[in-house]
Structure formats: C-alpha cells, structure tokens
C-alpha cells in the first residue's frame, strides 16, 4: 500500500476543493459557479446571518468577490435561457445540490417516508393530524405556490396557531408538515424571499428529465454519492466519505469497497492518520497551494471538524450554542486559510446599520509569522467588507492577533 505524507494529503484535499484552481481574471459568472460546484458538489445552507449567508461563502473563498445573484439565479429562478442549476435538499445537512443529483437522493426520501409512516408522531408530536394537514398543504401549495409557511398558515388558519412549545424551532403544525413533505420529496423550494423557504411542487421546479428519471437502486445511488464525495475530498477516510452526504455506515462501507474494486478509489496510508485512507483515482497533488481565503464555518473544506483537525492540525468548533461567557474564540468564527495552512481565526459580524465589518476577536495559530498573517488577513477583510457593501473594518481588542491586525487594517 502506498504511503502519502500528511503535507501531500493536505494539498490533495485543497486541490479537490478548488483552492489550487486559477483565480478568475474577470467578474465571476455562472460558468465559474459550475466549476466550483464540480469540486465541492454542494453548498450547505444555514439560517445564521451574523456575517453573511453560508451558501454565498464557498464561492467567495474560491473565486474572490462575485455578484451574489450568480448563486441566487442558479438556485431560485428559472428561465429558458438560464435554467435552474441548483435545488435544495438534505445532503450534508440542508444543502444546494445540482438538480441532476435529485434522483440520487430519492432513496433518502423513501427512507424518510417509511420512517414517518412507521412513526407518525415524529411529524406532529402532539396529534395525529399530519395526514389531514398534509392534504390541505399540498392543495394550497398547488394553488398558491411558491408560498412560505407563514402564508400557508394564514390560508389554513385553524392550524397556524398550534405550536409545539419548548422546542428549539417552535414550529407550527403547518411548518412541521411542510418540512415533512419537503423531506419525502413531495414539496421542494420554489424560491426564497429574504431567507424564508417558499414551497412549491417539484414538477414546477425541476426539469422533466429529472422528474422522469427512473428510480435508482439504493446501493447504486449510495455508490454514486460516495464517488462524488471522493471527488470533493480528494483523499479521505471511509468516515469522511460517509459524512459528506450523511450516508449510513453499512451502506457507506459497501460503497467504498465496491469503488475500490472498480479502481475509483485507491487505498493508501497517510502519515499521522490512524485510519485507512482512500485517494480518488483522479485526485491531483499540486506542488504548492497559494492564496488566501476566509472560510465560513459551513465551508465544505472544514465542515467535518475531525477531518479539519487531521488535515490541518486545527481544532475548530462552532460556538454559536455555547454561552458567551464560555466561548473561547467567539460566536461566528471564520478560519483563515493562507498558502495551504489554517493560520488564524476571526469572529466576524456585519454591522449593516453602522456600515462596518466588525472583527470581534482575532487569534493566530502557534508558530505563524504574525506580521505577515496580519497583513494578509487585513487585505482579505477589506475585500470582504467591500463585497458586503460595508465601508470599514473595525477590529476589537479580543485575541492575540488583534493588535497587529488593527494596525494592518489601518495601514500602519
């Protein structure tokens, strides 16, 4: 079995995610989006908007400043000239995926439909009304869609004020049923207004070629998703591959074995990794990876925290749900990638009222060149602020990099 150095493994992973690709010389377009998507395979969605939306971040990290309408048009609008490129579904959490990948996830829709059928109270914990509400939701979406859950509640008023109290989301019965129908593929996202999901029927969103595609056997679908994960990761353990699309362990292990047999995956050893690794047959090893990027907490390069530690020696967790007094680095922290290493992290907040990108904390990794890291990070922060339409970067005093970063931002 071939042994690969940890440095080579890191470069393979960065190249697989698009960080070794040449930066665009012109304003990024749909073509550039397609190129990044061929690397990452998906963009994770998240409701947190303290800095900017997670699904916009991967393109910014890989392409630099770009018009966000490139993503919006690809995901939530449709025309004969520019057909919809992306659709929402549960891949790695809630994600934007290529429309052509929808059939690969029908097995998950079938699994969830079976689960809900066997455990009906998993939809509405306090009643058995889910099937009846679902019939009314389908009819309302057919008539009024794309439509948000709030508007549906008004149309179906007798259900809108029934909420399951004490849960994190405090969802109404209508919203819970909408999410159930979304999970089993009977509804999808037609568009978003602000960030509100507006539900519509799949036949009004997806192209006929996707809707009429034959059913794919579960094992075949899992094998294809595992192969796509391997493209996105370049080199990975079976657990890494499994996590990318959240595949069940037994199914994942079978798929990996079959891909090894087919020559798609090569078993390798990586120095410092305790587990067996697999390299995609087409993965390349660049001599070096240069450039800089701020990585959103949900960027595909780092959303697997254990893999991030293994690849970069970077211990990272999101502290949104940690009480403020117990946070180590901050609420919404972006790791900073510089020339193939994670060298710092910053807690960011877009203060849109003041027109300021606030760096609420700035922290360097051990052993880095503080002056160079501060200068490069200052440049990236200024570029990000401009992209967000914010006029200034303001650095607070928290963190061991804060002082040098503040001076670099001010041009000293």
Image: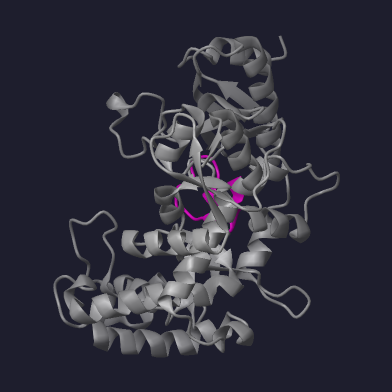
Q: Quadrant of residue 379?
A: top right
Taking the view exactly as shown, the residue that stands out farthest to the left is 126
Residue 185 versus residue 319 in the image, above or below: below
- Residue in the foreground of this view, choosing between 222 and 181: 222
Residue 307 versus residue 362 in the image, above or below: below
Q: How is the image coloured?
A: one colour
Taking the view exactly as shown, the residue that stands out farthest to the right is 25
The residue under the point 17% across, 74% down is 121
On the question of residue 147 being in view, the answer is no
Task: Give percent across and percent down for residue 77.
Answer: 65, 71
The residue under the point 67% across, 29% down is 380
The residue under the point 59% across, 72% down is 99
- Residue in the foreground of this view, choosing between 112 and 275: 275
Relative horizontal placement of residue 366, taking residue 149 as reference (left or right): right
On the question of residue 259 being in view, the answer is yes
The number of callouts visible is: 0
Check if residue 29 falls in the magenta segment.
no
- Residue in the foreground of this view, choosing between 21 and 317: 21
The residue under the point 67% across, 39% down is 285
Task: Give percent across and percent down for residue 323.
Answer: 28, 32
Task: Give percent across and percent down for residue 345.
Answer: 51, 26
Task: Give percent across and percent down for residue 81.
Answer: 78, 76
Relative horizontal placement of residue 90, taking residue 41 as reference (left or right): left
Q: Which residues fall within the magenta stretch? A: 40-57
């Amino acid at each position: 079995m071939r042994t690969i150095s940890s440095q080579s493994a890191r470069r393979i992973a960065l190249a697989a995610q698009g960080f070794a690709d040449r930066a665009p010389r012109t304003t990024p377009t749909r073509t550039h989006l397609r190129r990044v998507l061929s690397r990452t395979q998906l963009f994770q969605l998240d409701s947190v908007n303290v800095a900017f939306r997670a699904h916009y971040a991967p393109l910014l990290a890989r392409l630099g400043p770009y018009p966000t309408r490139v993503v919006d048009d690809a995901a939530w609008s449709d025309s004969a000239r520019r057909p919809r490129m992306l659709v929402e579904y549960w891949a790695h959490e809630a994600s934007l995926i290529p429309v052509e990948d929808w059939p690969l996830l029908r097995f998950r829709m079938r699994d969830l439909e079976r689960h809900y059928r066997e455990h009906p109270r998993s939809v509405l914990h306090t009643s058995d009304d889910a099937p009846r509400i679902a019939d009314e939701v389908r009819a309302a979406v057919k008539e009024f869609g794309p439509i948000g859950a709030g508007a549906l509640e008004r149309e179906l008023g007798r259900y809108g004020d029934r909420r399951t109290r004490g849960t994190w989301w405090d969802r109404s019965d209508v919203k819970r049923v909408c999410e159930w129908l979304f999970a089993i593929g009977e509804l999808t996202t037609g568009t978003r207004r602000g960030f509100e999901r507006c539900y519509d029927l799949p036949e009004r969103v997806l192209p006929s070629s996707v809707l009429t595609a034959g059913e794919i056997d579960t094992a075949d679908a899992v094998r294809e998703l595992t192969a796509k994960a391997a493209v996105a990761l370049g080199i990975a353990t079976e657990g890494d591959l499994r996590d990318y699309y959240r595949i069940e362990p037994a199914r994942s292990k079978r798929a990996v074995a079959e891909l090894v047999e087919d020559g798609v995956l090569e078993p390798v050893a990586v120095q410092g990794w305790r587990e067996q690794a697999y390299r995609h047959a087409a993965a390349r090893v660049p001599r070096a990876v240069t450039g800089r990027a701020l990585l959103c907490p949900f960027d595909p390069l780092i959303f697997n925290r254990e893999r991030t530690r293994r690849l970069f020696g970077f211990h990272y967790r999101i502290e949104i749900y940690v009480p403020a007094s117990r946070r180590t680095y901050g609420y919404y922290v972006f790791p900073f990638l510089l020339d193939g290493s994670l060298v710092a992290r910053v807690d960011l907040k877009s203060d849109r009222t003041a027109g300021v990108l606030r760096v609420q904390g700035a922290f360097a990794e051990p052993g880095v060149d503080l002056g160079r890291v501060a200068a490069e990070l200052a440049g990236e922060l200024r570029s990000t602020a401009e992209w967000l339409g914010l006029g200034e970067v303001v650095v607070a005093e928290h963190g061991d990099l804060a002082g040098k970063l503040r001076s670099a931002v001010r041009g000293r």
